[in-house]
Amino acid sequence: MNKEIIILGIESSCDDTSAAILNGRKILSNVVANQEIHKQYGGVVPELASRAHQQNIIPVVDAAIRKANIKKEEINAIAFTNGPGLLGSLLVGSSFAKSFAIGMDIPLIAINHMQAHILAHFIDEEKNIPEFPFLCLTVSGGHTQIVKVESPNNMQIIGTTLDDAAGEAFDKSAKILGLPYPGGPLIDKHAKNGNIHAFTFGKPKIKNLDFSFSGLKTSILYKIQDGVKENPNFIKENLESLCASIQHSIVNVLIEKLQLAIKKTGIKQIAIAGGVSANSYLRNRLDVLSKTANFDLYIPKFEYCTDNAAMIAIAGYFKYLDKDFSQQSISPSARLFF
Ligand code: KG4
Ligand code: ZN
């Protein structure tokens, strides 16, 4: 192995405990432990998430180091998610990272989770990467943003959601349909054979580059309630087309704002990131649009779309190059901006 800077990344912002090792930009390991426990509750239960992180963190880090086939003494720095996220969950990862940094006498690097989603594009990639400046549509369970990325360590949010995030819109719609959490991937799956025009829902009327999904969610709820009132089997009989129409409506909102951002900034290097960027319909629509609207589209590898520690490690790598290290007194924040 040609040894460069070796970073251990730790992600624990929500319900995935993850550890990854990067050698420069090259991935050596990326271990993710999903927390199945939340499924039965229809959403993430914060206290259960913190406890599961507490149970998972040591075995997950151990597995990442063993899989990478390195010794822990070879690690040059540890990067961890400092927010945004669930505070109890963040505290588990940050406490572990601080102890590891002290114990191994290596730098500690605090990472913004949303910036890390964007930097996931640079994991293992030398060629097929966006040129700076680029625009990134960052869509996850907690956030929906359009970010102007000037460099790995310099980015600005130019549009954001005023209420729900796109992932939330997927998950809450799925819940109304009786699908388990997280519903986004299930809507994606059921939508494949549905008719996108079967049902129409209210469109948000927000000016500028900001998003809103709460009106759309209410419109979906009312339409389904009305349908069930008339026919108790409404959901079962229309599941595929309901999923396709809901997905179409959410994706339309995202694409409309992204097009406006391209028009306003003149930037034609476009990336997507975050859990919702795993959505196949969003990917296909953007792929088609990139050809007609003439922009370069960058989609991260599937495994780096949803929460993972490889993205924390790559963000740590870029900060390491800038010697942007954190103090031991740093404390994670549930609401962290950049
Ligand atoms: O980035 P992420 O893993 O965690 C957060 O930082 O929130 O995003 C999770 C979100 C969930 O809302 C999940 O339903 C959504 O990403 N998601 C999807 C798909 N895969 C994950 N939404 C739509 N289609 C998918 N294929
Ligand atoms: Zn995330």
Image: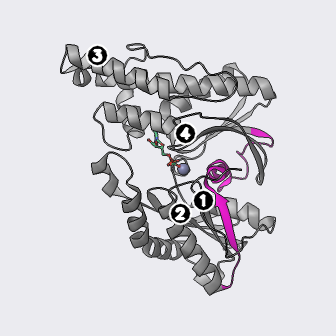
Say whether mark 1 is within 8 Å of ligand 1: no
- Point out the stretch of residues depicted in magenta: 105-134
The residue under label 4 is 277
Q: Quadrant of the N terminus?
A: bottom right
Instruction: Tell me where residue 31 appears, x and y as whole percent.
Output: 48, 64
Residue for point 69% across, 80% down? 106
Q: Position of residue 149 (x, y in %)?
A: 76, 44
Q: Is 111 part of what is drawn in magenta?
A: yes
Closer to viewer: mark 3 or mark 4: 3
For discs 1 and 4, the disc positioned in front in the rendered view: 1
Residue picked out by circle 2: 90
Residue 226 is marked as 3
Closer to the chain start, of discs 3 and 4, is: 3
- Tell whether position 332 is magenta: no
Sequence-earlier tag: 1 or 3? 3
* Residue positioned 68% across, 85% down in the render: 105
Q: CA distance from mark 1 to mark 4?
A: 25 Å
In what element is the residue under mark 4? helix
Q: Confirm or reject: label 4 Cβ below 8 Å from ligand 1.
A: no
Tag nearer the camera, 2 or 1: 1
Instruction: Give the crowd class for mark 3: few <14, some 14-19, many >=20 residues within 10 Å.
Output: few
Residue marked by disc 1: 333
Q: Secondary structure at mark 2?
A: helix
Three-letter amino acid code at the position of disc 3: Asp
Q: CA distance from mark 4 to mark 2?
A: 23 Å
User: Front-most of 233 and 306?
Assistant: 233
- 171 horizontally vs 137: left or right: left
